[in-house]
Each structure stands twice: as C-alpha cells, then as structure tokens.
Image (cartoon, rainbow, N blue to C red):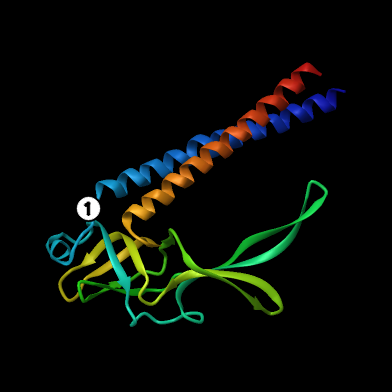
Amino acid sequence: MRSGKIFLLLIGFIFLIAGLIVGLGVPWFISQDSARVLALPVSDLASLSQQEPGSEVVIEARISPESKKQFDDYVAYRQERQERVRRDGRYRTEWRTELTVTPPLKVELENETIQIRNDTYNFGELQNQREVRINNELHRISGIRHNDSVVVIGKLRSNNDGIVIDADVVSVGTKSDYLDSQNEAWWIMVILGWLFIIVGSLLIWLGFRR
C-alpha cells in the first residue's frame, strides 16, 4: 500500500514538473522568439546594404538555382524514418527524425544573390513532403527546393562584396507564415502542458488519498 502511494506521488510530480516545463517554459521561449521576429522589419536589398554587420535581419527571398542539391531535388531537408514502437501494450507507428541536412545556401532577392554562409540553421516550416524507401525502410522527406520562397532570420555578416547572412532559421513561406507556425506551436505546447499538469495533479491527489 505504501509503495503504491509513493509510486503515484512520484509519477504525479514527474507529470506535474513536465507539464510546467512544456506548458509554461516552452511557450515562453516561443513567445520571446516570436516577439523578436515580429519587431524586425523585412529587409530589402537597399536596407541590407545600409545595416551594420552583426545586425539581426529578416529577408523574404527565393532559393537560387545555384544552391547545390543534396538529395534528389532538395537543397536542404529533414529525413524521418517510420518506426513501430510499443506503448501502453500496443504497437503504433511513429516518425522519428533520422537526419537533418542544412548546408550553406544561396537565395535571390531583387535579382541579387545572397549567401547563407552557415550550416547550423534550424528549419521552420517545411514543404514538398514525400515518402521514399531507403534500404527497404519507409522514410519521409520534407525540405526546401530550388525556387522555393523562404524567410531567412539571422545576422548580417557582410554587405560589401556581396551580402552574407548567418541564418538562425530558414523557413518556407513568408515572415507572416513563420509567425503563424510559431503561434500554432505555442498553443500545442500550452494544451499539452496543461494535460500533463491535470494528469499529474490527479495522480498526486490519488496518492495522498491512499
């Protein structure tokens, strides 16, 4: 009886803490990022040439045909593998990220080429999703292709001999699309967090009643 009470209390507190992190902590970081991006104007070529290196910038551009293809027609992509996992005594199918490829890119803005210099940026929204078989296993590929419209969020590194940006995020679509996806992620985390908090609180209450 006592061990059952301790188990319920322990699991309850774990759910409660996870809920606070997921439902409060993660949304706070998403809100901070969204507020930062919202405050940044979308830069055109003229404004980029006038800004100091190190400035945070947002541009809406198009992937240049000069960007090297990495897999089929993707210049950057995420590869997920379909796996069968056992949860709650039942098998279910889940997609797990197996590979993320984020090479330097070239984008076009007002007929000028801008270099995305780094290979450490994160993806925002991705499109062009399709399923392929690799080594007899089902995989899902989503990514960025030539001529895709993208929003790039990062720091300006050079605007002398060509514009160079170190990107934090490259996302398919516009700045508005990116902020919409952030808002959607905010709500998902809040709802998920409250579910964890409710379950954790219920388990704690049951534990104290035993």
* Image location (x, y in percent) of residue 3: 84, 27
Query: Would you place residue 52 above or below residue 32 in this image?
Result: below
How many other residues sit within 10 Å of disc 1, few (<14), some (14-19) or many (≥20)? few
Instruction: List the single residue furthest toward the top.
Output: 209
Q: At 81% from the left edge and 19% from the top edge, which residue is drawn?
A: 210
Residue 116 image-quadrant placement: bottom left
Q: Give the camera-side residue of 55 and 192.
A: 192
Query: Would you place residue 115 above or below residue 187 in this image?
Result: below
Decide if residue 116 is on the left or right side of residue 197. left
Using the rendered image of the protein, determine whether residue 30 is visible from the camera's viewpoint: yes
Q: Which amino acid type is shown beneath numbered disc 1?
A: Pro
- For the N terminus, the image quarter is top right
Q: Secondary structure at mark 1?
A: loop
* Image location (x, y in percent) of residue 8: 76, 28
Query: Would you place residue 208 above or below residue 115 in this image?
Result: above
* Image location (x, y in percent) of residue 175: 32, 55
* Image location (x, y in percent) of residue 18: 60, 37
Decide if residue 186 is on the left or right side of residue 108. right
Using the rendered image of the protein, determine whether residue 100 is visible from the camera's viewpoint: no
Q: At 30% from the left edge and 46% from the top edge, which residue is drawn?
A: 36
How many numbered callouts? 1
Decide if residue 19 is on the left or right side of residue 58. right
Instruction: List the single residue furthest toward the right.
Output: 1
Q: Give the camera-side residue of 55 and 176.
A: 176
Quickly name the residue at label 1: 41
Q: Give the camera-side residue of 62 and 13.
A: 62
